Amino acid sequence: VAKQIALIEAGYQEPVIKVGNLSSVRTFQDCRDAIRAYYLLSLESEKGNIPCGEAFNIAGEEAFKLPEVIDILLNFSDMGRGIEVRQVEDRMRPIDADYQMFDNSKIKSFIDWKAEIPVRQMLKDLLNHWRNEIKRGRIPLNR
C-alpha cells in the first residue's frame, strides 16, 4: 500500500490502491526492531544462554485492522482523501487468517527486548522509503 501511494503521488499509478482481504487483523513489526532482536539473541546464543535451534516469536504487540493501516498511510499523503481503495480478486489469498497476533513473552524471558519503533512511525518511514526510491529513478512497476 505504501508503494502504491508513492507511485500515485509521483503520477505513475491511477489514484486507486488495489488490495486483497480487508477483514484481517494483524500485528506489524518494524524490521529494525526485529533485527535488533535477532542481534540480541545471537549475543545470548554465543554466551551459551540459548539452546541451539530454539524458536522465538518476534512480533508487534498492537493489532490493527487492515483498513486502519491503510487510513494511517493515506493520512501521511496530501493526496490521501483523493485515493480510492479497491478490493481486487488477484490480491486475495486462497488461505488467509482473519486474526494474527503473536506472543512475545518467550523472547522477553531470554533477552531484554521490546519493540521501540511505533507502528505509525514505521508506516511513515515505509512510505518515505518508497517516495525516495521513486525520486532516485527506482520505480517499482510491479504490483
Image: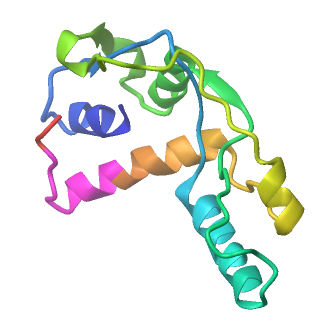
Task: Measuring from the top left, give residue 48's x and y in whole percent.
Answer: 78, 86
Q: Residue at x 72, y 33 (%)?
A: 62
Q: Quadrant of the C terminus?
A: top left
Please tell me which residue lies in front, 55 or 26.
55
Q: How is the image coloured?
A: rainbow
Total marks in image:
0
In the displayed structure image, the side of residue 132 where residue 60 appears, left or right: right
Please tell me which residue lies in front, 14 or 88.
88
Q: Is residue 137 magenta?
A: yes
Task: Measuring from the top left, give residue 108's x and y in whole percent.
Answer: 84, 58
| Residue 43, above or below 101 | below
Q: Residue at x 69, y 45 (%)?
A: 118
In the displayed structure image, the side of residue 13 where residue 96 appears, left or right: right
> Which residue in the rendered view is the most extreme toward the front?
52
Q: Quadrant of the N terminus?
A: top left
| Residue 61, above or below 21 | below
In the displayed structure image, the side of residue 37 where residue 95 appears, left or right: left
> Which residue in the rendered view is the most extreme toward the bottom?
47
Res 110 quadrant in image: bottom right
Q: Residue at x 63, y 24 (%)?
A: 64
Task: Measuring from the top left, give residue 84's x and y in whole percent.
Answer: 31, 11
Res 21 quadrant in image: top left
| Residue 86, above or below 11 | above
Res 19 quadrant in image: top left
Segment colored magenta? 130-140
| Residue 84, above or below 75 | above
Q: Residue at x 14, y 51 (%)?
A: 139
In the displayed structure image, the side of residue 38 where residue 103 appears, left or right: right
Q: Is residue 44 magenta?
A: no
